[in-house]
Structures are given as structure tokens and as C-alpha cells.
């Protein structure tokens, strides 16, 4: 029988933070940090696949999923602020040490958590969660950085295009060898949340803040080199947002990094759940022994 998955909400700094949780409360903790434009929904199948051995916690970031969505004038939509909320939730749940799985936006949040308290992170799984400029794929990032360098009507149009159903569907299907493995429920679910009134302003604010993540990379690389934290990269090799060079780059600072390139795209869990789960279970069993 699969472990039960609980759907809970906690209050952090006055904000409702939704999270999924499963597993023995006394087991080693694995925190799952989702990316754009999704939520902890992306981990709905992975959570029970890990929860027989681990306490698994998967929050929705503020502005995403079932968590609070304050207006941009009521909450600073930056990656620092999202990290503050995540750290607050972990503190509230009594989590002192944890492994983490990071994907897309979850990566810069995870790197910030590690930089704030390196000794608390026991291991890292990164699935198309970038930490090196090598990973940026043109032309996607040309449009992002054109907007961040000079926000305005001319550059904003491309970013608004990233908030459309067509773009959300593309993120799920691009690079997937067998698209029939990917349920359309994914992009329908994500798009419904993106289309909430006011959510566009939230996403544009986070796009504008993205360069702060790149500026953080040298500190992240030093953290990797100094800590030699166990790291597993399970990467959709056909991703046209974060390409395979982003996975290979981890080996520069972490020579023992375990890197697997899969014939999939940005949301590789949708097509390679069993393969990724197998790699994670094997990696964590060795790393957390």
C-alpha cells in the first residue's frame, strides 16, 4: 500500500503556505521545491514513491498552487522572499536537516537555503535546476534577459507570451520522446492558476528578479566546492530552457556528482518517473547512510 499523502496549510509570516507531506515524521527529511509555472502538484507521484523511507515535504511557493497569492504591492516577489517563506515553513515543521530536490525556480530557492545554513543540507537532487550559466539555452533566455535589462512594453510582450497556455503546454511536451506519456491535466492545472487575476504581475516580478540568481552563482559554486555536498543531477537532456550543459557543469565543483541525462524535457518526472525515482532512492540510500 502506498504511503498516505497529507495536504496541509501552515501560516508563515501571516501567509497561508500549502504543502504536501508524507512519511514517518522521524525519518530523514526530503524537501521538494517546484519550479515555474507549476506547484507541488508536479511531485504528486514522486511523494508516495519516496515516503516509505523518508519524510517528504513539498510546499507551494507564495503566488503558486494553493499557497497565498498576495498582490505585488503587499509582498516582495523576489527569490529572497520566497526563500524566507520556505525557511519559515521548515522551521515551523521542526526540520533541522534535510535533503532537497530542486527544479527550475526551486533551484535558486534551494541554493539560498544552502548558503544560509550549509550544514543543514544533507544531499541535493537537481532535475533541470540550474546553477551555472552553461545551462541557459537560447533563445529562451535572450528574451528573459532583454526584459530584465530593460523592462518595458517592447520586452514585456515575450514574457507575457511565457504565461500563455501554448507556452505552458510547450514546457511539458518539448523534448519528450513520447508525448503521450504526459497528461494534459498538467498544463490545464498550471494554466488555470496562472490565469488568476493579478498572477501575471507576480510572474513578471519574479522574471525581473531572476538576474539575482545568476549573481549568486559564484557563491553557490564556492559552497559546492567547500562542502562537497552529495549531488545527483537527473536531467531532461532535451530541455530548451536549461540544457544538458547545466547538468554537466556541476562536476566542475563537485567531482563526485552523479549525473544522468534522460531522453526528456523540462518536466522529466512526467515521462521518466520510475527512472528518476530509482536514481533518487539509490542516491539517497548511499548519501544519507
Image (cartoon, rainbow, N blue to C red):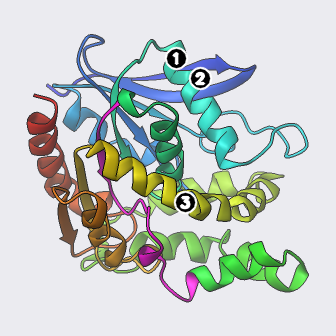
Residue located at (19% from left, 63% from top)? 259
Q: x and y percent of residue 135 in the render?
A: 42, 74
- Per the rendering, the mark at residue 88 is 2
The answer to whether the residues at label 1 and label 2 have Cβ atoms under 8 Å apart is yes
Q: Residue at x 85, y 43 (%)?
A: 71
Of callouts 3 and 2, which one flags the residue occurring earlier in the amino acid sequence? 2
Q: Which residues are magenta?
A: 121-140
Would residue 99 be counted in the magenta stretch? no
- Which residue is the site of mark 3? 188
Residue 181, quarter of the rendered image: bottom left
Comparing labels 3 and 2, the label whose residue is closer to the camera = 2
Q: Is residue 209 left or right of residue 166?
A: right
Q: Quadrant of residue 64?
A: top right
- Find numbered disc 2 in the image and state the secondary structure of the residue it sits on: helix
Left or right, 162 with respect to 47, comes to right
Is residue 134 located in the magenta-colored stretch of the structure? yes
Question: Alpha-carbon distance for marks 1 and 2?
Answer: 5 Å
Q: Nearer the viewer, residue 220 or 52?
A: 220
Nearer the viewer's eye, disc 1 or disc 3? 1
Label 2 crowd (10 A; few <14 / some 14-19 / many >=20): some
Quarter that holds the N terminus: top left
Question: Which of the two residues, 6 or 202, is positioned nearer the viewer here?
Answer: 202
Q: Residue at x 58, y 64 (%)?
A: 214
Q: CA distance from mark 3 to mark 2?
A: 30 Å
Q: Position of residue 47 (x, y in %)?
A: 30, 36
Amino acid at each position: 500500500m502506498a504511503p498516505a499523502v497529507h495536504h496541509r496549510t501552515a501560516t508563515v509570516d501571516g501567509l497561508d503556505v500549502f504543502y504536501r507531506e508524507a512519511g514517518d515524521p522521524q525519518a530523514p527529511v526530503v524537501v521538494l521545491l517546484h519550479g515555474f509555472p507549476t506547484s507541488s502538484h508536479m511531485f504528486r507521484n514522486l511523494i508516495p514513491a519516496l515516503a516509505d523511507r523518508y519524510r517528504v515535504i513539498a510546499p507551494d511557493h507564495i503566488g503558486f498552487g494553493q499557497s497565498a497569492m498576495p498582490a505585488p504591492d503587499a509582498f516582495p516577489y523576489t527569490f529572497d522572499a520566497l526563500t524566507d517563506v520556505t525557511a519559515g515553513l521548515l522551521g515551523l515543521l521542526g526540520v533541522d536537516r534535510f535533503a532537497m530536490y530542486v527544479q527550475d525556480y526551486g533551484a535558486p530557492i534551494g541554493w539560498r537555503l544552502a548558503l544560509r545554513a550549509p550544514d543543514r543540507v544533507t544531499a541535493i537532487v537537481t532535475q533541470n535546476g540550474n546553477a551555472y550559466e552553461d545551462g541557459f539555452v537560447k533563445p529562451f533566455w535572450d528574451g528573459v534577459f532583454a526584459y530584465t535589462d530593460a523592462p518595458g512594453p517592447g520586452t514585456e510582450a515575450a514574457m507575457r507570451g511565457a504565461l500563455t497556455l501554448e507556452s505552458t503546454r510547450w514546457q511539458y511536451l518539448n523534448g519528450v520522446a513520447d508525448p503521450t506519456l504526459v497528461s494534459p491535466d498538467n498544463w490545464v492545472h498550471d494554466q488555470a492558476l496562472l490565469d488568476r487575476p493579478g498572477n501575471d504581475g507576480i510572474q513578471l516580478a519574479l522574471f525581473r528578479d531572476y538576474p539575482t540568481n545568476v549573481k549568486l552563482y559564484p557563491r553557490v559554486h564556492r559552497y559546492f566546492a567547500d562542502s562537497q555536498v552529495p549531488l545527483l543531477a537527473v536531467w531532461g537532456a532535451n530541455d530548451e530552457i536549461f540544457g544538458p550543459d547545466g547538468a554537466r557543469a556541476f562536476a566542475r565543483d563537485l567531482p563526485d556528482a552523479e549525473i544522468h541525462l534522460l531522453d526528456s524535457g523540462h518536466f522529466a518526472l512526467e515521462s521518466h518517473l520510475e527512472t528518476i525515482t530509482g536514481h533518487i532512492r539509490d542516491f539517497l540510500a548511499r548519501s544519507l547512510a
